[in-house]
Amino acid sequence: MRTNKSGFTLVEILIVVVILGILAAIVIPQFSQASLEARESSLISNLQTIRSQIELYKIQHKEVLPTVANFDHVMTSVTDIDGADWVAGTAYGPYMRKVPDNPFSDGNTVDGVADDWLYTPNAANGTYTFVADDGGTCPDGTLHSAL
């Protein structure tokens, strides 16, 4: 009597496992690079958005910049021309629903010291800097704080 046995041999299974391992070794680094690039794109987009909203605030508030202390409040609420909470008259803002998260630190704290975002207004000449303050660098070596 002869029985037909069907199935894969151990060698065939090992060959498939090795091929899958090689493919995984090639594909997984590509996904991690894509993830990093997506976070960098998000960081650049967030910086552009915040900076443009600061400029709009400045234009609508007699060329006065928000201070570090009141940044979150005045950028996410309705204010009068002097930057106080709106009660009557012309209303300005809100400029954002909330301050966006820094995709590398996963926080949205804005202050004048090390944190997620670093905002330094210069009231004397009407300039400011708003940068990411996560200590990270891009693959090309550019610091996030230089974007």
Image (tube, grey):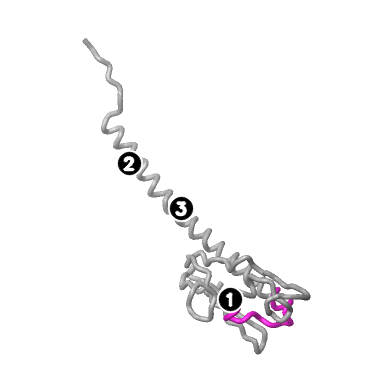
Q: Secondary structure at mark 1?
A: strand
Residue 62: which quarter of the image? bottom right
Discs 1, 2 touching: Cβ within 8 Å: no
Residue nearer the viewer, 82 or 66 = 82
| Residue 41, percent from left and from top | 56, 62
Residue drawn at (52%, 61%) of the image: 39
Mark 2 lies on residue? 18
Mark 3 lies on residue? 30
Residue 146, visible in the rendered structure: no
Image quarter (top left, top right, bottom left or bottom right) of the N terminus? top left
Residue that lies at the very extreme toward the bottom in this rendered image: 124
Residue nearer the viewer, 65 or 146 = 65
Residue 75: which quarter of the image? bottom right
| Residue 11, percent from left and from top | 27, 33
- The three-letter code of the residue at mark 2 reads Val
| Residue 128, percent from left and from top | 62, 81
- The three-letter code of the residue at mark 3 reads Gln
Q: Secondary structure at mark 3?
A: helix
Residue that lies at the very extreme toward the top in this rendered image: 1
Look at the picture and state if 59 lies above or below 48: below
Q: Residues within 10 Å of mark 1 (few under 14, many from 20)?
A: many
Residue that lies at the very extreme toward the right in this rendered image: 89
Marked residue nearer the N-terminal end (3 or 1)? 3
Which numbered dot is residue 130?
1
Residue drawn at (50%, 72%) of the image: 116
- The three-letter code of the residue at mark 1 reads Phe
Marked residue nearer the N-terminal end (1 or 2)? 2
Residue 4: which quarter of the image? top left
Residue nearer the viewer, 47 or 137 = 47
Look at the picture and state if 89 lies above or below 40: below
Looking at the rendering, the stretch of residues picked out in magenta corresponds to: 56-70
Residue drawn at (56%, 62%) of the image: 42
